[in-house]
Image (spheres, helix red, strand yellow):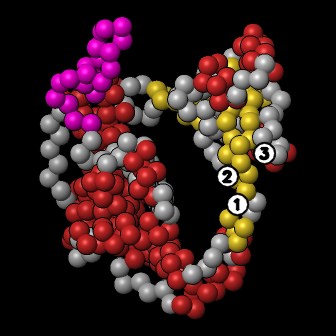
Amino acid sequence: MSKFGQAKFGAVGIFVAGLTVGIGVIGLGGCGKGGGGAVASINGEAISTDEWHRYMEFKPQVNVIDNSGNQVAARVAETMGFQAFQDLMRNKLMLQLAKDEGVAPTDKDIEDEIKFRNKMDGNFIPNLNSQGLKLEEIKDQLRIELARERILTKGIEVKDIAVNRFIEKNPAAFIKPPTADMQWILVKTEEAKALVDRDLKGGQSFSKVSSQYSQHPGAKTNTRFSQNVITSMPGPVRAIAEKLNEAQTSDWLKLSDGFAKFYVEKKTAPEKVAIDDLMKESIRRRLAVERGMIAIDLDTRLLNKMKESKIEVKLETLEGRWKTALERLEEIEENRSTNKN
């Protein structure tokens, strides 16, 4: 998905993450509502929906993947609840700004965009469904993404000659990278390594052994390594993927938090991507957005839209943080005004 924009008002906390709009990345307006019930039961004791959402408002840290592919804990810059509020507010402002500019996407535009994405990637909808997103939620996020694109590209025309020039100057961009579909096992101790080796040598399938012993998240139901584009893998894992053939198993790879072993199911070699009309249209849109990012300061437009908007924060846990953010913004603008004078 498209990822545009850079953080501009980080001290305010409002545009900390820039203006990235990606399906499945930024929260959706209709998701995560309360209303009772339970999200799970642990030995008969329920985790209520209200308890779950309340905890997420203050969750102090998240798990992230470092450059080596290891999962590590990181403290959040703001609470998860306030970050979610910022994302949703930004989404609302984006749609309102698009309406102000006369470029708000219609329902037909959304349907056409889904058709376009499906032609580019036949698994577009299924992949998002597998992440738990419903069709209406996908449409909501596409509306935000299209609104952003149209604000940036309003009045910009990219001619065929520019598209063809881009294709000529960027041949590597039209090579489908090599892939390796791999299963993996992550264990923490030497004892666990020995059990894995014993069962693999005993003839048990890699997937069965992984689901039994592996300690990576979701291993019980999904033993596949999350990344299959070889050139995007962390260095040590990439070396393994490049070296092994299909149906081969790696030696143990030492990680900062344990040991990993990989099994290659399928590999594909690099191949040229067909440059058809669909691909050219995708390039045209990309070039238009890039030109728009140079010509238009969208961060500032959204900030100005925010300042002129009537924003009422009604949740007590967000009210104080929002007030602090506005005070910081006023300080920044006062300092800028003083420096200019």
Q: CA distance from mark 2 to mark 3?
A: 15 Å
Task: Residue 26: give x, y in percent of width and height.
Answer: 38, 48
Q: Secondary structure at mark 2?
A: loop
Q: Of discs 3 and 1, which sits in the foreground?
A: 3
Mark 2 or mark 3: whose residue is earlier in sequence:
2
Task: Kindly identify the residue that appears in the image at 33 percent across and 40 percent down.
Answer: 84
Looking at the image, residue 273 sits to the left or right of residue 124; the answer is right
Magenta span covers which residues? 32-53
| Residue type at numbered disc 3 | Glu
| Residue type at numbered disc 2 | Val
Looking at the image, residue 233 sits to the left or right of residue 295; the answer is right
Dot 2 crowding, Cα within 10 Å, few <14, some 14–19, many 20+:
some
Find disc 3 in the rendering and name its residue.
246
Looking at the image, residue 242 sits to the left or right of residue 28; the answer is right
Mark 2 or mark 1: whose residue is earlier in sequence:
1
Q: Name the foreground residue: 196 vs 166.
A: 196
Question: Is 17 rendered above or below residue 237?
Answer: below
Find disc 2 in the rendering and name its residue.
229
Q: Quadrant of residue 49?
A: top left
Find disc 1 in the rendering and name its residue.
177
